[in-house]
Image (tube, grey):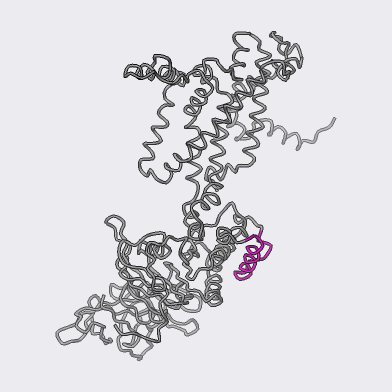
Amino acid sequence: MSIDVKKPKPILQLVGVRKTFGDFVAVDRIDLDVRQGEFLTIVGPSGSGKTTLLRMLAGMDVPSEGNITLHGELINDVPPNKRPTCLVFQSLALFPHKTVGDNIEFPLKVRGVDKETRKARALELMRVVRLPADYHGKNVMKCSGGERQRVALARALAYDPEVLFFDEPLSAIDYKLKKILEKELKDLHRETGKTFIYITHSLEEAMVMSDRIGVMRAGKIVQVGTPEEIYATPADRFVSEFVGEVNVIEVAKSAAGTWQGVDLPGTYTIRPPKDEDAARAFVVVRPEFMRLLDEGETADNCLEGTVYNEYSLGSRLQYQVHVGAKVMLVEVPRGRLANAARDARVRLGFDARDAIVVGS
Amino acid sequence: MRATPSWWGAEAIALRLPAAGTRAALPVALLLTAGFVAPLVAIIAYSFATPRSFDVFSSFTLENYAGIFDTSNTVWLSFLWSGLFAIATVALLAVFAYPIAYGMDRLFGRWSSLVSILFVFPLFVSENVRLYGWVLFFIKNGVLDGSLKAVGFDGGPDILFTPGMILAGMVYTYLPFMLFPMTLGLAMVPKDLIDAARDLGASRLQIWREVELPLAMPGILIGMLLTFVLGIGAVAEAKILGGQSVIVIAHDIEIAFTYSQNWPLGSALAVVITLFIGVLTLAVFGKLDLDRLLGRR
């Protein structure tokens, strides 16, 4: 392994971390470097082990195997109250019998900070998370969902952790508010300069906020990269499908070295997969790269099908086109008039440079 | 007198049938009236009747109450004993039941239902039978004393028929009534909050003081209230284990209604104790959010 001097030093390092519950392997030998000050999101479907991973990082679970180091020091067995890390729970875990102010001041109170200093710090943090100052004495259960998020965030910041963990705190928030809070969280990341590790099942959420995204599946991290890398060069079919709706065409290499469609017959012009010797591959085409071809227009690969339905996606229109036994999705910007009506025969096309080829 | 037809019509409909809710509540209302309100009214009425008479509703006197609050009578001593026993029972139970409740909620896992059954099981046997069992165990030449003598010791301690024995019997008898509300209270504390408090730097003691205890308080308070009320009204322990060395208030009431046939005095005593417990109960429930306790919110 070569040493890349440009890379910031990892603050948290996971080496071969594994967690089993009886026969069940929740987290399966994960290696991961978390860089100082980055916003890293671990994304994966439910049951992929991301919460277990986070609980180990926060100290609430101890790894069965492997090492977790913080600034190079082994912290496997360090309890959560002795770690400079703090977790914002999915449930937020606010203390229902305490006021907003007492919730935020909790980490300071248990540390023995005096009352005035505590209150001053709480008010300062309430300003940071955009909570009005008169909420200090408010019953935390009387706050709205969005306000509770802010209280939980302020409370975590009051602990002054080096690393902040987030366990899907926005999952119960309605869409519009979620969009606002996502951006605020990213702004807060910038303002505080702390390392954020966020887990979610929503890649959309991950894309908005993260510097880097790790995609988890069945206890393993399948790919780590910037949102652009995850989007443009997914490691496999799972990642590509996780990113959003995609068209997948299975192809097999013929004796002559050309790629033949498995369920959609024809010869496909595609870039070679990473594994040059692979006999089978999946061609992944995002709906926005699949084109409705005009009369006489051509593309590297052409398909013919029947329009089944049209969906409005706001600024874009999506068409569901039946090609043979498969369903293909095509997206065109609204305004660029498409000549597709229901049951119309259309020609679809995509170019080799727009198609991602993955081995599995 | 003139009535408008429309008004008359509306009244007719209203008179025809009460609302469905009222009708549905009627059986319970009747049962409560016959089973609880009527006896209560009778007791209150008796408490103002001429002492040692049955002139209920036909005489009115405060003599019975005056007698209770007259310190030359010894009835205040019975109140004191009952109060002391009840307070001591609640205090001891709070200390004993908390670790068991904690274990049932956090530690025993799948064994906790077995532990619950073990604590419920004695309730299937009559309280008097169980207390007589204690008497047989501790009495002179009984199970303990006799066994110790048989193996050459001087015999068991002479603790039967003492206030200490009464208290031990009460703690034993009322343990389930403290334990289960307390377990419920502890089970209501979300585990997330404990994890969060720990994550925010709190020590075990701080977690207990700041999070666990205040959130489990409703259950603990209900357990305390329940055992206090039971303790104030307890009579079997004092009679059987105390051998009448101490007279508690419930025993006084019983004597008034039976042996001395002084129903007005017995009623007045009952009213005083009911008022005392009623005020206490209201004070405690005023502090509790029952909806939250029952998980409706």
Q: Main secondary structure of the magenta part?
A: helix
| Residue A21 x/y as whole percent | 31, 56
Could one spot residue A244 in this view of the protein?
no
Q: Which residues are magenta?
A: A114-136
Residue at the location (39% across, 45% down)?
A: B107
Q: Is residue A62 left or right of residue B227?
A: left
Residue at the location (59% across, 10% down)?
A: B258
- Relative to residue B46, is residue A208 depicted above or below? below
- Residue B54 occupies quadrant: top right
- Relative to residue A34, is residue A123 depicted above or below? above
**Of residues A117 and A304, the one drawn nearer to the viewer in this rendering:** A117
| Residue A173 x/y as whole percent | 52, 63
User: In the picture, which quadrant includes the N terminus of chain A?
Assistant: bottom left
Residue lying at the far left in this picture: please name it: A255
| Residue B48 x/y as whole percent | 73, 16
**Of residues A325 and A241, the one drawn nearer to the viewer in this rendering:** A241
Could one spot residue A137 in this view of the protein?
yes
Residue A117: say if magenta. Answer: yes
- Relative to residue B131, is residue B112 depicted above or below? below
| Residue B159 x/y as whole percent | 47, 20
